[in-house]
Image (cartoon, rainbow, N blue to C red):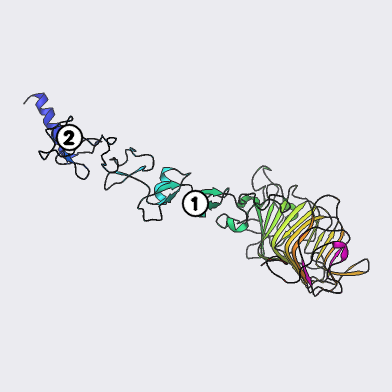
Amino acid sequence: MSRHVLVGALLLLGTAGCWQYRAGYCDQNHPQCGPGLTCDPNTHHCVLPDAGGTGGTGGTGGTGGITDAGRDVGVDLGPPRCTVDAHDCSGMTPFCDAVTLTCRGCKSDDDCASLDPAKPACLIAADGGTTGVCVACTANKHCPGTAPVCDTRSNSCQGCLADDDCKLHPPGVCNTAPLASADAAVAPSRCVRDDEAIYVQKTTGCSDAPVAVPADASAPDAGVASGTSTRPFCSMEPLRGALSALRHVVVVSGSVSGASWSYDDQAGAPITIVGKSATIGGAASPAFQMSSGDVTIRNVSFGTVSALGIEADGGTLRLDRVSVDHCPGGGIWLNGANFDIRNTRVTNDGPGDHDGASWGGILETSVPADGPRNISQVTVTDNTGQGITCKDALTGGEVLAANNGPVQVSQGCKLALCADGGAMCGAQP
């Protein structure tokens, strides 16, 4: 046997033993042709059968010469053929089906995540489609903390507007614009990172130990040994040494004791105190006190044993969904601070004393000429002493003030009153 014959025989044996699909090729044992097509044994192309039944004699020039490659001649030959792992699918059908060896769309999120991390979600048409297209998201679970909300109209990830938008990204806090900003209601923002937060919770394993001296001041955690999610502070007292521009969000859970010191812009940046079913309590000192800086507090209740609830002697105080209840020294004293108080309840407080005059709910004795002085959607009820007492005219929407004594709202406040609690009257649920 000649060398050429031997090589040919070995090639035939090798081909018979490990045949592999090649685009545009077929044979009688592996026709790989779509519905209504046959394999031409001469050209090894898929063809339409001619009058003779096989289409083989037509070669590539007659009716039988219409092959799998001629997809632009108006003949529907089904999805493009492909080879698994050959990466020969693209566009709207980027995946090769291992069973049919045809290009298809995605069937699951796993398909998409392996193809493009920026489009990890498989969107399958609601009208019964079996495959879909890869998009950025179909639900919030597909979105990162920098843009945690899935807009299902555009299947794109957007910024957060509320803490609930960040449930999947601990600590579950949206770094929203200050409430006084004109675009606060529409400007999207991102979720706070865990390394930006300081945790306070009186629970097993908590510690108020002094904060460690940072080994590297540029480190994201600034060297904080306590106040983490796994080792929270037990009270608000050690925050003085933990707050910084790098760690500027305080997450409070459960009932904790307030600080004996006044916040004086120790962070050097606006801070946010967010409650998770939280109550901050005071004894002889206010539950919270500040003299400068910019502080936003939301979803927190305040109460004291013998002192007033919140005292702001400077800076800017912003309250949203806050409750100040059962503070014998009075509810909120605004003494030289700017403020934006919304959706807040001040109840069962007082009587406080200021220069011999009794007050109960909210007392404003001084406000800077510039900056916010807003009180809106606030409920002030059942306080011993005047409900809201003002030295200066304030701004804001309607407030609900009732069952305070002897005056509900002093005339100097210039606030509009509403009579019945509802969607536009008083604090909201």
In the rendered image, residue 225 lying in the magenta stretch gets the answer no
Q: Nearer the viewer, residue 387 or 87?
A: 387
Q: Which residue is mark 1?
A: 142
Mark 1 → mark 2, Cα distance in angstroms: 51 Å
Span of residues in magenta: 387-413
Dot 2, how many residues are within 10 Å of its Cα: few (below 14), some (14-19), or many (20+)?
Answer: some
Q: Which secondary structure lies at badge 1?
A: helix
For the residue pair 21 and 8, the one nearer the viewer reads as 21
Q: Position of residue 371 (x, y in %)?
A: 81, 51
Of all residues, the one furthest to the left in this rendering is 1
For the residue carrying disc 1, how many other residues have a C-alpha within 10 Å: few (<14), some (14-19), or many (20+)?
Answer: some
Q: Nearer the viewer, mark 1 or mark 2?
A: 2
Q: Evaluate whether residue 304 shows in this view.
A: no
Question: What kind of element bears circle 2?
Answer: helix
| Dominant secondary structure, magenta | loop
Question: Per the image, is 391 magenta?
Answer: yes
Residue flagged by tag 1: what amino acid is it? His
From the image, tell me which residue sits under label 2. 63
Q: Position of residue 60 (x, y in %)?
A: 18, 30
Horizontal placement of 363 versus 234: left or right? Answer: right
Q: Quadrant of the C terminus?
A: bottom right
Amino acid of disc 2: Thr
